[in-house]
Structure formats: C-alpha cells, structure tokens
Amino acid sequence: MTGSAPGVTVVYTTYRPVPHFDWFADSLARQAGDADVEVVLVDGLHAPERTAAFGEMVRGRFAFRHVPPMPSPYAGPFRRTQRDLFSAASARNTGIVHASKPYVVFCDDLAVLMPDWWSEVRRAAADGYVVAGAYQKHREMVVQDGILAASCCDPSGVDTRWQTGDDSRLVRIEGSQLFGCSFGAPRALLVEVNGFDELCDSIGGEDAHCGVRVTFSGAAIYYSRRMLTIESQEGHGAGTPRWRIDRKTLPSVYLRRLREFGVGRRCVNGAWDSSHMIIDILYGTRSNQPMGNYYLIETLNEAALTGIVSRFPTTYWFDGRMLSEL
C-alpha cells in the first residue's frame, strides 16, 4: 500500500551542447507541482553560462543544482587518457553524492516525461522499491510547455522490455534489464552497492551492471510502462563525442587476469574482451560491490570529490596498458 512519498532527487546527466533540458524541466514541473523534489544536473560541459541558461529553464519551480561530473581518469579535466572516453558510471555516481533526498531517480537527456511518469516515481518512492521506467525514441519531436505535441516513433528505438509489461501493473524484471535512461531507487540502496561500477567507464553497460548488483543485495526491480520517457532519436547523433573502447587479449591472458579478480572460469560465452570480462567478474564473484571505484560513496561529499584523483590508476585495468596511450 502506498504511503507518504519521501523527497525525490532527480539526477539528469548530459554531455551535449543542446540536451533539451527545457523539455524535461517543463514536463517535470507540470507533473510534480509543489512536491518535495530537487534536480541535480550533472553536466560534462559545465560552465557558468550554462548554469545561467538552465536556471532560466527551471524558473524557480523546483530546487536545482548544476554540477560537473566528479573527477574521472577517463574524461574531464583530471583524465589520464588522451581523449574523453565514455564515463557514465562516474557521472551517475556524482548525482548520488549530491542527492539530498532519500529516493533518487535517473533521467537521461533529450527526453520529455510522459504524463504518468511522476505518479509512478512517487509510488515507488513511497513504497521504497526499485522502479525501471520505459522509453521510446522518436523523430521530429515537437514539445510545447512540457507536452509532446507531435513526433514520429522510430521502430528501432522501442524499449526491448515493452512486451513484458502492460499499462495496468508493475512487472518484476531481471537486474540486467535495468536501463539508466529512467529508473529510481532508494538512495540508501544505491549507497549500499556503492553506486555504478567505474570498471564500466570507457565501455558502457554500467546501468544493467548496477541492476544485477542490486538484485544480489536482495532487492527486486519492477518495470513500469506508465513511467515512460520519449527521447529524441536525432539528438543522439549530435553532441560532444565520448569514445568507447573494448580492448581484446589472448585467451590465456584473459583467464589469468580473471583469476586475479578471484574468478576461476568464464561465466558467459563471447569474445576475449573487456566488456565480456566485466560480465564474467560480475557473475563470477556475485558481489554487490563494484570492482572499479576508488571511493566509498557514503564517505564522499562535494568538498571531498577532488581528493579521489590521487587514487587514480596509471594503467588500464583490463590489460595493463598505460592510460596515457588510450
């Protein structure tokens, strides 16, 4: 039974020059009203002029903070790589650190919230369960005052989980079906699993990886089609490039490295590359803790974030190559 909803922090992450934050801000304000909600915008292009522009979009309708991602060896001013690599795990963890409310929801950029999104978040927050929202990708989107006025659905951008649910009930899903574009969880649970695993930075898949560790902690994940976001398909092709790498090695080297993580054999079939090793480590250890974080989220605050730089590695975790060569 749904009780009184606690406060909610919505973490919105972007690395794009034009993330269409106005779509999100207008649709959230329309739905949430005077609810206890704050938005933490984690912005890889953080700058004073962007803070001012996003603040104008919020117009005081809800609490708002605009922050840069925490230091990462793979992207940003503290990087040890030659170029910015994909680093969604550290960006999402930044949001957890800054979140002041007991329930945290993640929302990707380029998205507008559909009318039942907030009511599903509020229900999940009140009852304290992990909720995975649905998504679709559309083209030619026209959004007016937070309402999707016109668009064309892209068949290639339909949620792969869509057929497992319906509009009238929640459906329990596997941890590997947790997608970062729209989901919520109690902050205490995210702290318990120490957030997203930075082992996934430079590769991706940090959302499903976190979902599996959440289930290892004993929590269930429920999929809601009513908690729907519509994303711009065209927008995904624009913005600041963040490269992904998926390095490969010889089977003998792969297995030796795997044993260093305490895993004696492969758990999945596939290539001898870093993305598969992450999965092998995850299911081989069955630990709810990340292997690539240099910190405990529960000990971090804004003032302590730069202190993690001294703990950064100089070599890549998978094959020992110097980060400065990547």
Image (cartoon, helix red, strand yellow):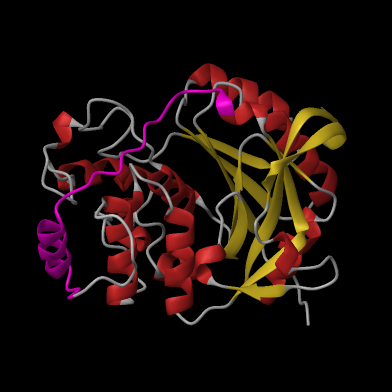
Residue 20 is situated, as x and y percent measured from the top left of the image, at 67, 28
Compared with residue 313, is residue 21 higher up or lower down, i.e. above or below? Answer: above
Residue 126 is situated, as x and y percent measured from the top left of the image, at 71, 72
Q: Quadrant of the N terminus?
A: bottom right
Residue 26 is situated, as x and y percent measured from the top left of the image, at 78, 36
Which residue does the image show at 61% across and 61% down from the upper left?
A: 184
Q: Nearer the viewer, residue 162 or 68?
A: 162
Compared with residue 18, is residue 65 higher up or lower down, i.e. above or below? Answer: below
Residue 99 is situated, as x and y percent measured from the top left of the image, at 52, 53
Q: Nearer the viewer, residue 23 or 230?
A: 230
The reply to whether residue 303 is visible in this rendering is: yes
Q: Main secondary structure of the magenta part?
A: loop
The span shown in magenta is 237-264
Count numbered badges in the picture. 0
Which residue does the image show at 74% across and 73% down from the upper left?
A: 170
* Residue lying farthest to the top in this orientation: 49
Along the horizontal axis of the image, is 287 left or right of 48? left
Quarter holding residue 222:
bottom right
Q: Nearer the viewer, residue 160 or 260?
A: 160
Along the horizontal axis of the image, is 232 left or right of 216? right
The reply to whether residue 129 is visible in this rendering is: no
